[in-house]
């Protein structure tokens, strides 16, 4: 494997680094400017792959790059990017694999720079013919766009490719042959109560907590005992790894009395009710401005 190119001095006193046969002028030899530009040049060279591939001029795409080759490179990036802090892959990786598999099957040997809006529409129509739901098709189409967008950012394909793909509008409800998602209503409380005795104790506790707080399943699985403050009458949960927002507080409430009408008044705020829990349906999360409920 080739070593990192060194900075050397020309006879005219200029500092130069040679990368892939090209001499890059970095400034006057022995100056801080020359050292700074040298470090920046080497960092950019390594980011492009270093000695693994020749450096291209800015905006110059890889000639003859097929869709299959683009998918292979993007997949390596996706496996590194779409993972949790502990290194396990996220569910997004499975969606990416399904979408790229169909793309490779139909357009694997096609020049990546020649993949345009009509090709994307054709790909999308195959998912419609398979009977997939409109929202699922939208996710798969977004994956394909992301793959080509990444290729543009890596200067593998020209920017005109992604600009063309962005002109393909998403499917609108009732205006395409794609199936619509079936509305799933909340589970009746009677059904939930009848199911609880048949569940293992941990699962039963999760169902009851989700019923009372309205949190999603992913938040339940991420809960740790160390993140729950049980010192008070109301248990407070602080998310260990919040997504997109600051840490949130959530209360572990117990069932409301029937006389409470499904709400609890906020202490010190007459006339205001806490939306932390609503009996018998999925509810909105308690806002940060809402004080703990006096259960």
Image (tube, grey):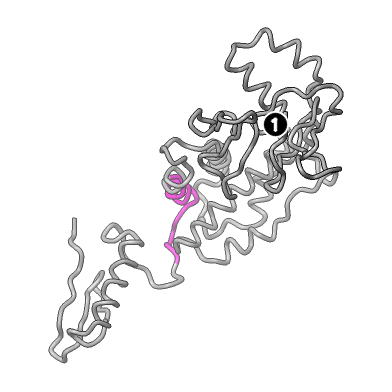
Viewer-proximal residue, 142 or 107? 142
Q: Is residue 68 shown in magenta?
A: yes
Q: Circle 1 sits in a helix, a strand or a loop, which is it? A: helix
Where does the image place residue 173, in percent across and percent down from the top left? 82, 45
Please identify the quarter of the rendering in which residue 4 is found.
Answer: bottom left
Q: Is residue 244 shown in magenta?
A: no
Residue at 62% of width from left, 19% of height from top? 205
Q: Using residue 56 as the reference point, say whether residue 121 is left or right of it.
A: right
Above or below 128: residue 10: below
Q: Which residue in the structure is indicated by mark 1? A: 213
Above or below 45: residue 175: above
Residue at 27% of width from left, 71% of height from top? 39
Residue at 86% of width from left, 43% of height from top? 271
Total number of numbered labels? 1
Viewer-proximal residue, 60 or 238? 238
Where does the image place residue 33, in percent across and percent down from the top left? 27, 83
Q: In the image, which residues are magenta?
A: 61-75
Could you classify mark 1 by the number of other residues whose Cα lies within 10 Å: few (under 14), some (14-19), or many (20 or more)? many
Viewer-proximal residue, 291 or 250? 291
Q: Using residue 168 as the reference point, say whether residue 40 is left or right of it.
A: left
Residue at 72% of width from left, 44% of height from top? 290
Viewer-proximal residue, 214 or 12? 214
Please identify the quarter of the rendering in which residue 257 is found.
Answer: top right
Where does the image place residue 160, in percent across and percent down from the top left? 58, 66
- Main SS of the magenta part reads helix
């Amino acid at each position: 494997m080739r070593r990192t190119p060194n900075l050397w001095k020309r006879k005219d006193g200029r500092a130069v680094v040679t990368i892939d046969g090209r001499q890059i002028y970095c400034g006057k030899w022995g100056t801080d400017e020359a050292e700074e530009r040298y470090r920046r040049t080497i960092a950019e060279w390594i980011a492009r792959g270093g000695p693994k591939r020749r450096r291209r001029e800015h905006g110059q795409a890889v000639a003859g790059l097929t869709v299959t080759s683009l998918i292979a490179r993007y997949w390596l990036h996706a496996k590194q990017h779409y993972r949790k802090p502990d290194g396990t892959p996220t569910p997004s990786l499975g969606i990416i694999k399904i979408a790229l598999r169909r793309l490779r099957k139909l357009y694997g040997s096609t020049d990546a720079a020649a993949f345009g809006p009509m090709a994307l529409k054709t790909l999308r129509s195959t998912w419609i013919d398979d009977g997939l739901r409109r929202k699922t098709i939208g996710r798969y189409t977004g994956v394909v766009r992301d793959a080509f967008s990444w290729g543009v950012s890596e200067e593998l394909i020209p920017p005109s490719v992604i600009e063309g793909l962005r002109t393909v509008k998403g499917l609108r409800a009732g205006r395409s042959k794609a199936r619509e998602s079936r509305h799933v209503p909340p589970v009746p409380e009677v059904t939930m109560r009848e199911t609880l005795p048949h569940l293992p104790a941990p699962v039963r506790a999760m169902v009851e907590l989700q019923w009372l707080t309205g949190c999603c399943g992913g938040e339940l699985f991420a809960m740790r005992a160390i993140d729950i403050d049980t010192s008070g009458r109301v248990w407070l949960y602080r998310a260990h790894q919040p997504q997109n927002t600051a840490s949130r507080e959530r209360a572990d409430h117990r069932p409301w009395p029937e006389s409470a009408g499904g709400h609890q008044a906020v202490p010190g705020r007459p006339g205001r009710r806490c939306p932390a829990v609503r009996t018998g349906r999925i509810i909105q999360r308690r806002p940060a401005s809402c004080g703990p409920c006096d259960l």
